[in-house]
Amino acid sequence: MKKIVGLVLMLMVFVAVQSFAQQPSPVKVQEGLVQGTLEDGLTVYKGIPFAAPPVGELRWKAPQPAAKWEGVRQATKFAPAPMQGGNPPSGKSEDCLYLNIWTPAKSASDKIPVMVYIYGGGFAGGYTSDPWISGEKLAKKGVILVSTAYRVNQLGFLSHPELSAESPNHVSGNYGILDQIAALKWIQKNIAAFGGDPSKVTIFGESAGAISVSMLCASPLAKGLISGAISQSGGSFGPTRPTTFPGENMKTLKQAEENGKTYVQKAGVSSIADLRKIEADKVPSGFGMPGGWPITDGYVIPDDQHKLYEAGKYNDVPVLIGYNSDEGASFSREKTPEEYFAGVRARYGKFAEELIKAYPAAENSVPKTARDLARDAAFGWQTWAWANLQSKTGKSKVYYYYFDQHPDYPKESPKYGYGSPHAQDVSYVFQHLDTKNPETTKSDLEISEAMATYWTNFAKYGNPNGDDFPEWPAFSEANPKVMYFSQKPFVGSVPSAESLKVLDRYFEWRRSPEGEAWAK
């Protein structure tokens, strides 16, 4: 019996020692001490506040500094996601401004490059607790991976004359982008304590996260906070428009303030003060409500981004930018040629017929050529314009890619003719492919390894090259080369180049007095 008791005691001591070994030393940040966990060679911190909870009177205000705390704060689980539809794994709350860190550093003096991920979700959703964007695989490639939250939906982007009057900068909206900037400022001040190099901070994101990356590259408020940028299916180079479409999503402050008045009326209150009294889960939100997207406010986003880049007024850092081959499958709703033609004519006016020729539809269906117009208006042209503008007006290099990794579907398959849909690339970059799925091929794993390596090399060197993968040339007008991810990495020409030129003429016309008047 004594032997058994002794063995039990020894086992308890062993478990206690092992548990203690999993607790790294606390790290000091400007607000206090934080305690993370050791996970497979990395130190992981979840739920570190980078700003004060944006609640009460701080609802619809720029983020404020986080409060200091006494003792050691446990940073061992994801904080709640911002308020949105659905049920994120970590729950949701208006108190949502937190970030997470995966670091391979062994000491605070390691000076490891940093990658900061900004989630997508149409500026209406998204959360850092999504397992597809867990950062351990990228961190093991020699970077510190940070994922940060930001306010979404109307809580993140509402404009209103009363809110503009409150602001010292006389603007409103763009609170979600200001949250991202606040996180980047926190990283500059604190990441060295986690072994990071604040002079090497690369932002990256997909969809709304990639659009955010584009906006941060254009915002003077982000100057000096980033050393590189990766955009996966993003960009914001279209002009403002009262009635928005994918690729022409932006409104002016004045237009957004008018929409804000409508929003207050729909909420059934008469003032912002009354709106602040409503519980967060009762605040009207969603795509059908005004005020759920960033705007050109003259402060955070000073102007039409295309014009800013033409004038060289942007944060000139190396960029790695691209999109997927069948983004339109996620955004094109037309099923028949008649529906497609009607939609093109409603959106593109005098350029409709030219675009229908450039992106034709078959007699009995809307094939990928027609879906490609939706892809290019929202993502392809945005990326192509970004690459051309920066390669002409900037000093930093541009690396352009096209993701087209998918099976060759047989003719009898309902997926016949389809390419790579929106967001498919995310699991490849983060190396979270389902290896138990029999449909995951050796080529999928090789593409994932290539993308993760290119991405992390870019964060380390400002250049994706440096391993045993094909050389990725910088994009320029004289050498408009693109890295394809399609069964293997290879270099090719810009996809749909001639069609993009037609779309470019449309956007150029839209920025003319005639085009602006037509859009109104």
Image (cartoon, grey):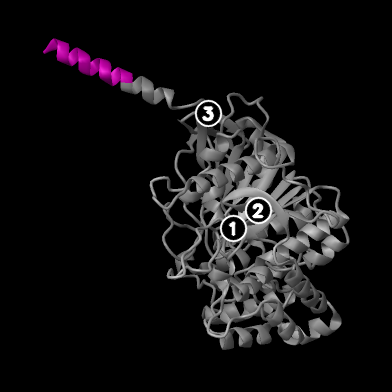
The image quadrant that residue 55 belongs to is bottom right
Q: Quadrant of residue 158?
A: bottom right
Amino acid on which the number 3 mark rests in the picture:
Pro
Q: In this view, does 346 lie to the left or right of 424?
A: right
Residue drawn at point x = 27 percent, y = 21 percent:
12
Point out the tag, 3 or 1, that comes first from the N-terminus: 3
- Mark 1: amino acid: Asp
Contact flag, marks 2 and 1 (Cβ < 8 Å): yes
Q: Secondary structure beneath disc 1?
A: loop
Classify residue 27 as left or right of residue 162: left
Q: Distance between the residues labelled 2 and 1?
A: 7 Å
> Which label is found at residue 37?
none
Q: Which residue is at 66% across, 86% downward?
A: 346
Rendered view: 259 above or below 470: below
3 falls in the magenta region: yes
The alpha-carbon separation of the residues under discs 2 and 3 comes to 43 Å
The residue labelled by disc 1 is 404
* Residue 278: x %, y % from top left: 49, 69
Residue 282 lies, in percent from the top left, at: 46, 70
On the image, the x and y values in percent for residue 263 come to 58, 78
Disc 3: which residue: 26
Q: Residues within 10 Å of mark 2 (few under 14, many from 20)?
A: many
Residue in the foreground of this view, choosing between 374 and 127: 374
Q: What element carries label 3?
A: loop
Q: Which of 95 and 515 is in front in this view?
A: 515
Q: In which quarter of the image is the N terminus?
A: top left
- Residues in magenta? 1-14
Q: What residue sits 67% from the left and 63% below the top?
A: 174
What mark, if any, has residue 484 been given in the picture? 2
Prevalent SS, magenta region: helix
Q: How far apart are marks 3 and 1 (CA)?
A: 44 Å
* Horizontal and vertical percent position of residue 87: 41, 60
